[in-house]
Amino acid sequence: TRTDMTTASDSTKMAIALSSGTIAGVAAAIISHPADTLLSMINKSPTAGGTGSIASRLVNLAKEAGFTKLCLTGLGPRCVMIGSLTAGQFAIFDVVMAATGASKFHFTDPNAKNAAH
């Protein structure tokens, strides 16, 4: 069933905010993880990845590590951390919006006929 947000309880709204934040955070963690892993590797040592430009050193490090290691090493804790942080941000946003009485969004249906036009 579909939840009508105008009649949803505060706990339902918070559950939606937390789950949405968790999903968004985990997706962001997964997408950014390989690049962040490479940056961590290159920052550990001035000679990491050999000599040459930063781009060539990053390519060397990626080849040395392999696709699986870049994508999976440390991914679990990262998902927990970023998912939790993002869920917290979504929750804080909802609490502040409710406390200030501000409304979130005013979307209009582009297919609805406007009487003025």
Image: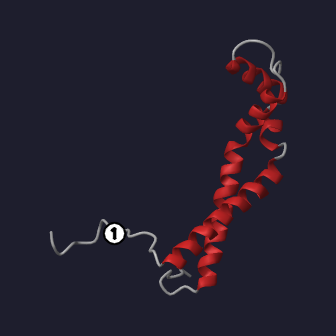
Coloration mode: secondary structure
Q: Residue at x 84, y 42 (%)?
A: 73
Along the horizontal axis of the image, is 117 left or right of 24?
Answer: left
**Residue placed under numbered mark 1 in the picture:** 109
Q: Position of residue 74 (x, y in %)?
A: 84, 46
Badge 1: how crowded within 10 Å, few (<14), some, or many (20+)? Answer: few
Instruction: Give the image quarter of residue 85.
Output: bottom right
Residue 27 vertical placement versus 103 (above, below) = above
Q: Residue at x 33, y 69 (%)?
A: 109
Q: Position of residue 29 (x, y in %)?
A: 71, 49
- Identify the residue at the far left of this view: 117
Q: Nearer the viewer, residue 88 or 19?
A: 88
Q: Position of residue 117 (x, y in %)?
A: 15, 69
Q: Nearer the viewer, residue 40 or 64?
A: 40
Residue 53 vertical placement versus 115 (above, below) = above
Marker count (numbered): 1
Along the horizontal axis of the image, is 6 left or right of 48?
Answer: left
Q: Position of residue 108 (x, y in %)?
A: 34, 69
Instruction: Give the image quarter of residue 41.
Output: top right
* Position of the N terminus by quadrant: bottom right
- Identify the residue at the far top of this view: 52
Along the horizontal axis of the image, is 78 left or right of 20?
Answer: right
Label 1 sits on what residue type? Asp
Secondary structure under the numbered disc 1 in the rendered image: loop
Q: Residue at x 83, y 18 (%)?
A: 47
Q: Residue at x 38, y 68 (%)?
A: 107
